[in-house]
Image (cartoon, grey):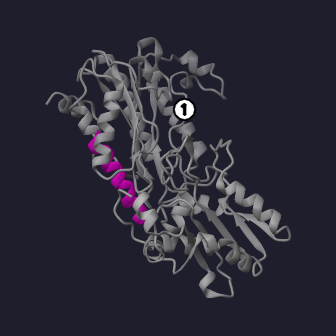
Amino acid sequence: MKYNPINPALFIKNRSNFMAQMKPSSLAVFNSNDIFKTGADSTMPFKQHRDIFYLSGADQEDTILVLFPDCPDPAHREVLFVTETNEHIAIWEGEKLTKEKATEVSGIQTIYWLKDFDKKFFEMMTQCDTVYFNTNEHYRQAVEMETREDRFIKKCKAQYPAHSYAKSAPILQRLRAVKDPIEIDLLQQACDITNAGFRRVLNFVKPGVQEYEIEAEYLHEFIRRRSDGFAYTPIIASGGNANVLHYIENNQPCHDGDLILMDVGAQYANYASDMSRTIPVNGRFTDRQKAVYNAVLRVKNEATKMLVPGTLWKEYHVEVGKLMTSELLGLGLLDQADVQHENPDWPAYKKYFMHGTSHHMGLDTHDYGILWEPMQAGNVFTVEPGIYLPDEGFGIRLEDDVVIQESGEPFNLMRDIPIEVDEIETLMNS
């Protein structure tokens, strides 16, 4: 891994918190992700399942974690299964986790080779009544392929039909939504790397540059700072491309007088950052571009202040809609008649700002969190309003990542990333 070692105290605490919410006489199983084939003997880069990483720190394929807090054998209350390594594997594939290294990374004392899983698991299953399966219940999930977890669930139910089954997702949704200070530090590192990439791009952009060249500048800076790369597919959208919310082709030239909307974020130690900035290709905003830009910035700043403990996500978005409506009226994009006759299910402002303002951040760019429960300290949210004007050939989105505090305004992890018009223009023309 490119990133520096993570304090295993994080994973020890995470497991303790999870096990404290398990039913009596139950165990929970967490599988690593598959390695996905691309064709012939080629594979995609491995990405670890975030839940097993959250609970163990094991960032390696073919790994299984079993948690069994009531196990009569104390050695089997936390067990990590990893692929047995040897000199041949080390030569061809590189270093894998040894038993000693797996303990060092995770804090788990009992490490078995994966080939022993069926035997050891049978023993543990004879001692428990309930099995927690790690199903994907994220509100945006749309996975169509069968996962390693899916295969395990089918096999387990077939072999142990008399057991009861439960879901780990409700527990993890709450636990992962509240970040530990170690996690906040990792998120800060991801945001700091993103900051470095953005500042590099400010010195690079000029009329005639290609969107993909900007993408390359980000990636260069990210990798050289120990990032895993992009946390998600980057959006480098110049001119009218910015009005396509998930534009990812990044294959067009950037023209003098246009704006570039960039939605990018570095990933560090599997933790994501998520930044949006909009800059002028030639280093100077026009008066109209500046007016729209500052309207978006004001909405972002005021929306950020609402992210405090007790806020409800749905009500928060209603209030942000009121802020945006006021700004659109000021820009002449809406008039009072538009607002008076708007459809409550699709308010007038949605013509120009059609997406949500905030989502949970963490190990996933759209991280775990229960949207119908009040916000609480330790939640990390994006704040990302935008105004999109296809008829005028540009769109603007501004986005920061913030941590909700016990009191006061949230802490902005992207506070050092330039966002004010004057600062951007100065840096691009220095």
Residue 312 lies in the magenta stretch: no
Task: Tell me if 210 is positioned left or right of 407 in this view.
Answer: left
Q: Position of residue 224 (x, y in %)?
A: 27, 48
Image quarter where the N terminus lies is: bottom left
- Magenta span of residues: 180-197
Residue 184 lies in the magenta stretch: yes
Which residue is labeled 1 in the image? 355
Task: Tell me if 287 is positioned left or right of 100 in this view.
Answer: left
Q: Position of residue 197 (x, y in %)?
A: 29, 41
Would you identify the image quadrant in which residue 237 lies? top left
Query: In terms of secondary structure, where does tag 1 sit?
Result: loop
Tell me which residue sits at (81%, 67%) in the image.
159
Which residue is situated farthest in the front direction here?
88
Which residue is situated farthest in the right direction here?
162
Image quarter where the C terminus lies is: top left
Q: Amino acid at mark 1?
A: His
